[in-house]
Image (cartoon, coloured by chain):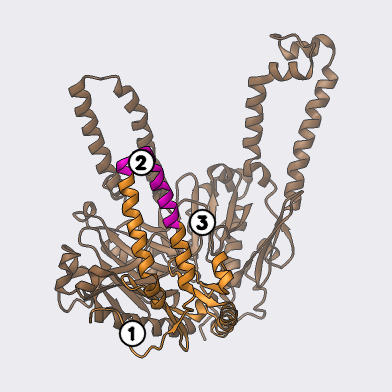
Chain colours: A orange, B brown
Amino acid sequence: MSNRLELADVSWRRVSPKLVWVELASAAVVLLVLLAIGTGMWLLKLWVPLAIVGVLAVGSIVQLAIIPRRVRSIGYQLRDDDLLFRRGIMWQRFVAVPYGRMQLIDINRGPVARVLGLSELKFVTAAAAAGVTLPGLTAADADELRDRLVALAESRRAGL
Amino acid sequence: MSELAPRESAAVPPEVPPAVAALTDGQWHRLHPASPLLRGGIVLIAILGAVIANLRERLLSIFIPRFDEGGDPIDYVLNNGFVLQALLVVFVVLLVLIAGFYLSWRMHSFRITNEVVEERSGILFRTNRKARLDRIQGINIVRPFFARLFGAAKLEINQAGQNGNLQLSYLGSRAADDLRREILRLASGTHAAAVTSDPAVAQGFVDRRVGELLAPELDPGLAEPESVVKIHLGRLFGSIILSEGTVILVLALVGGGIWIATTGEYYALLFALPSLFGVGSVYLRRFTKALRYTIAGTPDGVRVGFGLLSTSNETLPPGRIHSVQVRQSLLWRPAGWWEVRVNVASHSSNKGAAGQANTTILPVGNFEEAARVVALVLPGFTLPNFLAVGPDDGFTNSPRRAVWLRPFSWRRNGFATAPDWLLLRRGAIWRQLVIVPQPRLQSVAITQGPVLRLLGLAGIHLHTVAGPIRAELGAIDRDAALAFFGSVARAAVDSAQRDTSHRWRAGELPGGSPA
């Protein structure tokens, strides 16, 4: 697998392993909905839609199986002048955002994440496509990281 | 600029016409007195008139139960001796309308200080909007035909975001031009005195109106005439006809014709005719909107103007263009035509030339004209001849194994880096070059899916503000992409720190020469 994307001399900070449970919960909801629809189809003897729902259900079970690896693949690093972010195993994605480009920082907490004490931090720039979202930070970490990023952005402020 | 003598006072240059100095003095000012009428008052009255004309019997019978249906209301008024009351009602309605218009005009005011443009409006619900001068993304002057007759113009100050524009509608036509120049001068951070052109102003109301209607959209005192691109009528016509839409239209016509001829259902022609008229009017509108297209460089940025009856004319200050795309479709290749589009942070409420989004900065031109436009919008950049293909074409292109994913274009699918610019070239059928100025780059990403991994390739994305251009490239050699990612991430930080274009003329001294 020498063709994989790897960046030299980067020590990634990983997110909390508890994020696995958040992801599992949302995948399980999808699976339950699919099973309910499938049961309905089976009772109504609609075989073709049932097959489609079945394929979707198998797909979401596979998703469930790789969630722990997917969570482990999320990483970030605060470099001197920019934030480096990575995620994905099959579809790898690395993003580098200069701190000065920050427009605002969002912190979101879903219901399951709140129970586990996790927050999601979103780094918003003027470009909608950047999509730098750090899930699975402990609430204290997220607040601290937000304050740190805002301070860094303030010292390196650039225009649009 | 160097022929200007040093001024005693840089704050209020003496060349500014008195009317404008008054508008930019930091005090609150009102808009053109006809503004409420132009902004839709006339439409309102017309609608009201139509409603009353159509429903007058019904309306009268609601209010006056004894009213004899079918009779003329004027007869009714005369016969029953209600002349006085009727006149009173009409008078009160008129009075309320005029009072409303007057109030909305009186409550709508704006001011321009050294830092912000601020607008207050609304009678019951007050609105206050501020635009910071160093965050202005562009200033647009729009003159709808009706407003032009009144000698009025709409000044739109564009800011970043979906709904961030500040509209001063309406101002006097000359005042709008002068005001834009003054706002740009204040925003540029220059200490140099303003240059004003003073064309001979015709005497008399009618002469002045006619003069304004016929005047060119570009202020001749500011434009550099040699940089203006002219679109010939034939080329404009051809570029509108030679589009993908026309191909679909022709296919639909041929298909429909065959269907009608074989089935003999000639009544279908009745339905086809109105839609043909509709399509024709779309083509016509594109044509008329792109007439009188001009583009020129001014000290305060690029100015793009167009329109025959309703005109529009926008100034984009330097450093407000986030990416530029030069592209050509297969249909245009025999003619050698190119289109230039840009990504900007603001979203003007007005359509651009040729009825397209106003991000199309050159609707059609040959390569040399496209290069001139690119040089205007990206000062200091010269468009390379990116059509050549080969090992020394200046681009890092896809390796041969990318032929599986880019069967036609792998030889010309690549990137190049210059000190301040990033260039992405792609497409064999729809050829294009995307140029991203490094100081405008928001972030950079590198991606790889399973297929790309198998071939040892990767994709790169340059994130800029949202717009029609997507600055991304797929199927690049993995190592080259990683090197690009690393160097661009570093360069983006450096060039953003060096960038001073939010105050683009801050270095200029009162004498007018750059520091």
**Chain that bears disc 1:** A
Indicate the secondary structure of the residue bearing disc 3. loop
Q: How far apart in space, not on screen, are marks 3 and 1 (Cα)?
A: 41 Å
Label ID, residue B348: 3
Q: Residue at x 66, y 72 (%)?
A: B114
Q: Residues within 10 Å of mark 1 (few under 14, many from 20)?
A: few
Label ID, residue B38: none
Q: Nearer the viewer, mark 3 or mark 2?
A: 3
Indicate the secondary structure of the residue bearing disc 1. loop
Residue B480 location, x and y as percent? 25, 80
Q: Which residues are magenta?
A: A30-49
Residue tagged 2:
B283
Q: Residue at x 29, y 79 (%)?
A: A5
Q: Amino acid at mark 3?
A: Ser
Based on the picture, tell me whether residue B503 belongs to the magenta stretch: no
Vertical side of A12 occupied by B76: above or below: above
Residue tagged 1:
A7
Q: Amino acid at mark 2?
A: Tyr
Are labels 2 and 1 on one chain? Answer: no
- Res A86 quadrant in image: bottom left
The one of B510 and B281 positioned closer to us in this rendering: B281
Vertical side of B272 occupied by A127: above or below: below
**Chain that bears disc 3:** B
Indicate the secondary structure of the residue bearing disc 2. helix
- Going from N to C along the chain, the mark reached first, 3 or 2, is 2
Quarter in which the N terminus of chain A is drawn = bottom left
